[in-house]
Image: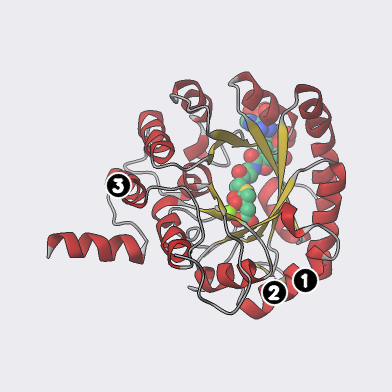
Amino acid sequence: MSNPLPINLPNKVKIVEVGPRDGLQNEALINGKAISAADKVALIELLSDAGVSYIESGSFVSPKWVPQMATSAEVFEKIKRDKKVTYAALTPNMKGYEAAIAVNADEVAIFSAASESFSQKNINCSIEESIERFAPIIADAKKRNIKVRGYVSCVVGCPYEGDINPEAVATVAEKLLAMGCYEISLGDTIGVGTPASVTKMLQAVSARVPTTQLAVHFHDTYGQALTNIYAALQCGVAVIDSAIAGLGGCPYAKGASGNVATEDVVYLLNGLGITTDIDFDKLLQAGWFISKKLGKQPISKVSTAYFAQQKA
Ligand code: HMG
Ligand code: MG
């Protein structure tokens, strides 16, 4: 089905699946225990089998700060890799980067913020210091031909500073691009954006970074993620981060809920006639698999509706 709407939208969208990292990093421990590496591996393999071509599969951060990610090395070692899939790792500094390289992460992601207070709470340093920490990562990655993705957090609002000036986002995004990141993912970490604030922010950023090198990353705290994605598509953004079953949140943004659910994003894109190459039924199964492991229902309206239909 082609897009019947009187607006230009991308024909194809790349989904960056962040559930195994951004999702699981913030899931509560069950009886003091983190989700097992084996369950993470099974989830990642279900996602790749569903046709998801980019999976952020873990992070190499301090296990004291983020216990759910302590098994990331084991996960990378055990996944049965599909050549068509990029298995990426989030790395905050050289130590994390070296650990990711040791287990053959295909790509790494570095992360900064448009808010000073959030940067301090999240990675214990200023925005400028974080950028300095990334320089050796990018230099080494270049030598090894490993692509580096950059995140900017708090692109419309910050839990500590409130509204964020779009120019502050553009400044950090431009720096990450100039350093060598091939793509900048703009994160509404606490999910406060609306199409108005998101469009304003995207206009400011795309004046300095080509839209073809931008991705959007919405948490759904205020229920605005899908409508914000639709606004971003209208601005020409064709890379969308999402988490299977709407898992997660951010451990350093109190009250932030999970990322927008991949199932809901793919349903929207299918309806708009935008290709993702993802098998929708297999995607739903991946969401139910991990939700059962976590003892809860997927936070995906689409998934819940399909499940109810099957039972009826
Ligand atoms: P620090 O305490 O400032 O670091 O933490 P340090 O260099 O002083 O080291 C302290 C200890 O941490 C030492 O161990 C280091 O070895 C260890 P000790 O001597 O105490 O035993 N350490 C590490 N261990 C494992 N892996 C590492 C590492 N680095 C140091 N890479 C640090 C700095 C960045 C490590 C810490 O602040 C941290 O891990 N923070 C976690 C940040 C995080 O994972 N946040 C969530 C992800 S970001 C996010 O979700 C937002 C995003 O989704 C976009 C959006 O939604 O907006 C991307
Ligand atoms: Mg996030």
What residue is disc 1 on? 203
Q: Which amino acid does label 1 sit on?
A: Gln
Image coordinates for residue 93, horizontal then vertical, percent: 73, 35
**Viewport quadrant of the C terminus:** bottom left
Image coordinates for residue 45, horizontal then vertical, percent: 40, 33
Quarter of the render that holds ligand 2: bottom right
Dot 1 alpha-carbon crowd within 10 angstroms: few under 14, some 14 to 19, many 20 or more: some
Above or below — where is 115 with respect to 28?
A: below
**Label 3 near ligand 2 (CB < 8 Å):** no
Q: Which amino acid does label 3 sit on?
A: Gln
Above or below — where is 35 with respect to 9?
A: above
Which residue extends farthest left?
312
Q: How far apart are marks 1 and 2 (CA)?
A: 6 Å
| Front-lying residue, 233 or 221 | 233
Image coordinates for residue 142, horizontal then vertical, percent: 80, 28
Q: Is residue 274 left or right of residue 308?
A: right
Which one is earlier in the sequence, the residue at label 3 or at label 1? 1
Q: Distance between the residues labelled 3 and 1?
A: 37 Å
Give the residue displayed 48% in from the left and 25% down from the top: 81
Q: Which mark is residue 285?
A: 3
**Label 2 near ligand 1 (CB < 8 Å):** no
Q: Which mark is residue 199?
A: 2
Dot 3 alpha-carbon crowd within 10 angstroms: few under 14, some 14 to 19, many 20 or more: some
Give the residue displayed 84% in from the left and 68% down from the top: 167
Dot 2 alpha-carbon crowd within 10 angstroms: few under 14, some 14 to 19, many 20 or more: some
